[in-house]
Image (spheres, rainbow, N blue to C red):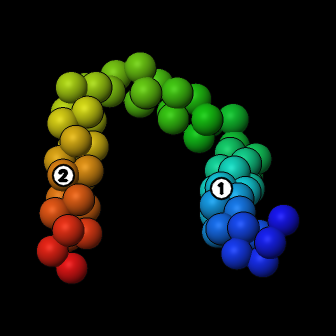
Amino acid sequence: MTKKQLIKFLKTVLPLLLGVYLTWSIFHSMTEESLHFFYKSLEEENYLMLTLGLISLYILTRKIKNHG
């Protein structure tokens, strides 16, 4: 593995590992009541609005990347 490949690999893997760790840490520190509230809010979520928001965020970031 060359130095360039190693840097590319680390730039991909390290943020993913950090995200997994932070997610685990947050859920691990939540109380039973907080977890119940979280799961209940997921059941009541309006997924159409969530999807539209994510699509809008994707479009916005692509425009910023292309013009910046």
**Residue 16 appears in view:** yes
Say which quadrant the N terminus sits in: bottom right
Which quadrant of the figure has residue 9?
bottom right
Inter-mark Cα distance, 1 to 2: 22 Å
Circle 1 is placed at which residue position?
16
Which quadrant of the figure has residue 48?
top left
Dot 1 or dot 2: first in sequence order is 1
* Residue type, numbered disc 2: Ile
In the image, residue 58 above or below residue 62? above
Tell me what residue is drawn at x 80 percent, y 72 percent. 2
In the image, residue 2 above or below residue 49? below
- Label 1 sits on a secondary structure element that is helix
Circle 2 is placed at which residue position?
59
Instruction: Judge by depth and name the residue closer to the eye, 8 or 43.
Output: 8
In the image: residue 44, left or right of residue 5: left
Tell me what residue is drawn at x 27 percent, y 43 percent. 54
- Label 2 sits on a secondary structure element that is helix
Q: Residues within 10 Å of mark 2 (few under 14, many from 20)?
A: few
**Residue 14 appears in view:** no
In the image, residue 58 above or below residue 8? above
Residue 50: give x, y in percent of width and height: 27, 35
Q: How many marks?
A: 2
Tell me what residue is drawn at x 65 percent, y 55 percent. 16
Residue 11: give x, y in percent of width and height: 64, 69
Say which quadrant the C terminus sits in: bottom left
* Residue type, numbered disc 1: Leu
Q: Is the residue under label 2 in contact with that under label 1 (CB below 8 Å)?
A: no
